[in-house]
Amino acid sequence: MSDEEQEGRDRRTSDAPVDLSRERETFVRQFLRKGVELTESLLVENRALVAKLEQLERENTRLRAQIASDDAIRDLIRKIDSLEAERNELLTRSTELEETRRESEVRNDQIEQELHDLANLYIASHHLHTTLSVRGVIQRLIELLQQLIGAEQCAIYLMDPAGGAARPVGADGVEVSDLPVLQVGEGPIGEVMMTGLARIQDDPTIGGTLEEPIAVLPMMVREQPVGAIAVARVFEQKSRWAAVDHELFKLLGSHAGNALVAANLYADARGALAALEGIDAHLNLSNS
Amino acid sequence: MADFSCLVVEDSPMMRQLLVFALARIKRISVTEAEDGVDALRKLAGARFDLVVTDINMPIMDGLKLVKRIRSDETHKDVPIIIITTEGSTEDRQRAMALGANAYITKPIQAPQVIQKVKELLQL
């Protein structure tokens, strides 16, 4: 239907003036068009808003995940820090334990060395006093010098009762018969027998002779010199005096003379019980 | 009860005692003493030993002869042997090692050194 036909029909069906009807019609149409446009605009805007909402929701989800992830990272960082601190503590503890272990090892070595030294002293004392034979004491004395000190050449001198001279009574690395009688006060050995003071070179490797020994020890009985022990040389593998050597020197100096005196007294006795005869008198135990 | 048995061969009673003292510091080891090479062979014939510590200079049969005899003995041919002697020269050491000794210690002995060698040889 054309506009003219529509207008004719309108004229026939309405009592309103044609201009007003047309105006109304125009208005309605415009109104309706505007309504459609507005609706379409609203629909477009709605779709845009829906899209925006979806985008924001996605963004929100992503951000939530990000926050959760950040929290996890922060937790991990805290855990790493804690583990790092624990590791450092363990390292410190380990270093301390290692230090303690080293100290214990050193201490253990010292204890082993001390035990060895004590064993040397015990053996020296034991073997020197468990023989009551003069020859036995001399032999053991020489053996101690050789085995425990490492003496390659040594000699033992005993002073005569007058105390003016000393004769050799035992030796190793040299024949006793080749050794001279010494005068007390003369030469290194004679001086030691006079003073009662040991004479020991700092370096045992210098290699002495029995005229100039590297070590001379006085044999003392009740603070009186009765003889001397002289070490001329030590074995080539002995590079220095050990701490126990000085202890052994002291022990031999103070025990050898007593062992010889005891052995000499015992030699004239007819057995152990006979040697003990009359002992009560010395203990004030006599019943008579 | 001891896990290892050691034979100490030494003619000097004081050295023997010193070696026994040193070896007693090692747990799980028992020590048998012999006065010379012949005494050692008798004891080796009667028991199984895990280690022999022997002096070189001894009467009747010296340590070097003893090492040779041990190396030709079926039961003890592989037993570790430590030689102990007053001789410190390289030649003596080489002679003992050539005969089959596993280690060499010179006198005067130091117990810690003996203990260390024994532990090495017995892998303790």
Image (tube, coloured by chain):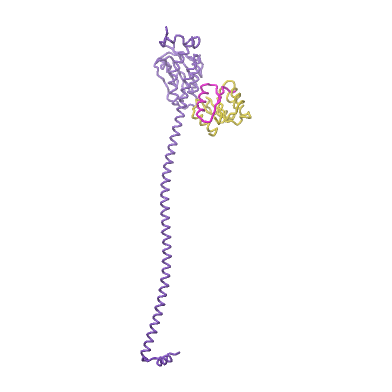
Chain colours: A purple, B yellow
Q: Is residue B28 magenta?
A: yes
Instruction: Give percent across and percent down for residue B102.
Output: 56, 31
A6 or A130: which is nearer to us?
A: A6
Task: State whether residue A107 is above or below residue A39.
Answer: above
Residue A21 as seen in the image, left or right of residue A270: left
Residue A110 position by quadrant: top left
Residue A206 as seen in the image, left or right of residue B53: left
A236 or B72: which is nearer to us?
A: B72
| Residue drawn at (51%, 22%) of the image | B14
Q: Is residue B101 magenta?
A: no
Indicate the quadrant containing the N terminus of chain A: top left, top right, bottom left or bottom right.
bottom left
Residue B122 in view, yes or no: yes
Residue A181 in view, yes or no: no
Task: State whether residue A239 is above or below residue A58.
Answer: above
Instruction: Give percent across and percent down for residue A128.
Output: 48, 18
A108 or A189: which is nearer to us?
A: A108
Indicate the quadrant containing the C terminus of chain A: top left, top right, bottom left or bottom right.
top left
Instruction: Give percent across and percent down for residue A15.
Output: 37, 92
Number of marks: 0
A143 or A284: which is nearer to us?
A: A284
Residue A37 position by quadrant: bottom left
Instruction: Give percent across and percent down for residue B69.
Output: 62, 26
- Residue range (magenta): B8-37
